[in-house]
Amino acid sequence: MSRRPGNPARRLADGGSLPFVGSMHSKSRSSPILSVALLVVGAILLIGYCYSGSGGRISDREALSKAEGGASCTLEIQRSIPILKKAYGDSMRKVLHVGPDTCSAVSSLLKEEDTEAWGVEPYDLDDASANCKSLVRKGLVRMADIKFPLPYRAKSFSLVVVSDALDYLSPKYLNKTLPELARVSADGIVIFSGHPGQQRVKGAEMSKFGRPAKFRSSSWWTRYFVQIGLQENEPAIKKFEQAYLKKSFKPACQVFHLQSSD
Ligand SMILES: *[C@@H]1O[C@H](CO)[C@@H](O)[C@H](O)[C@H]1NC(C)=O
């Protein structure tokens, strides 16, 4: 994917104003026409400016309202793929997604060229779609209780992306699960988790997850990573931030980047 083009309003001004500069010299007496023309140009510039400026903000708002409405961080992954690609480049070649609704994440990852993807569904696949069942048949998606060791060899994947799942684990199980994610990944772990006070799972879904989600603050997570000896992946954090600022996209979930274990 290429760089975001420059400010469209500026480009409009460069290209669009030239004919009027010409007409100003040649027909300086036709001032009413000129002022109307200038007014039109002004209006176009203004519309262009508003349009380009509001793009990011609108999608932020949509994302936020979706999150408040109970949508998941797994959906955020689909929107974040271009940004993850910028931040992780080559490390996107073998991705394991871990989390509820993993079929949707795996399907979107598989659409990317040069990306192979697998999924672990921690809850159930009982009401899986036909597409999801086919991913299971192909061995790309499997169900596994992430409170226990994952059924993969060390460094089986270049990148592990986990969404929502950790919000349902107590620190006792996080202590088992996070080191496992670090073990099966080679180049890092990306964690998407809800913000404190964000979405609430409805009663019907509660039985599936076993316990209510607990959305921890960014400082809680940071302290926790230190406690269990996992390092944050500073270069990836920087690249991810740069990429999403450029696209005026702000993730509606918290995103953490950790190093894999050595
Ligand atoms: C998790 O692991 C850390 C570091 O080993 C330890 O200090 C902490 O007590 C553990 N938490 C639980 C709930 O077992």
Image: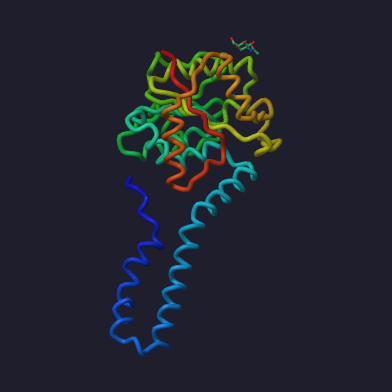
Q: Residue sitting at 38 percent across and 31 percent down?
A: 88
Q: Percent from the top left, x then y, of residue 78?
A: 46, 41
Q: Position of residue 212 (x, y in %)?
A: 69, 29
Above or below, 202 against 27 in this view is: above
Q: Is residue 148 above or below residue 35?
A: above
Q: Position of residue 191 (x, y in %)?
A: 51, 29
Q: In this rendering, would 111 be left or right of 214?
A: left
**Front residue of 248 and 1:** 248
Report which quarter residue 188 is drawn in: top left
Quarter of the picture holding the N terminus: top left
Name the quarter showing ligand 1.
Answer: top right
Residue located at (35% from left, 53% from top): 5
> Is residue 14 toward the left or the right of residue 248 in the image?
left
Percent coordinates x, y for residue 126 in the rendering:
55, 31
Which residue is farthest right?
Answer: 203
Quarter placement of the C terminus: top left
Q: Quadrant of residue 93?
A: top left
Figure label count: 0
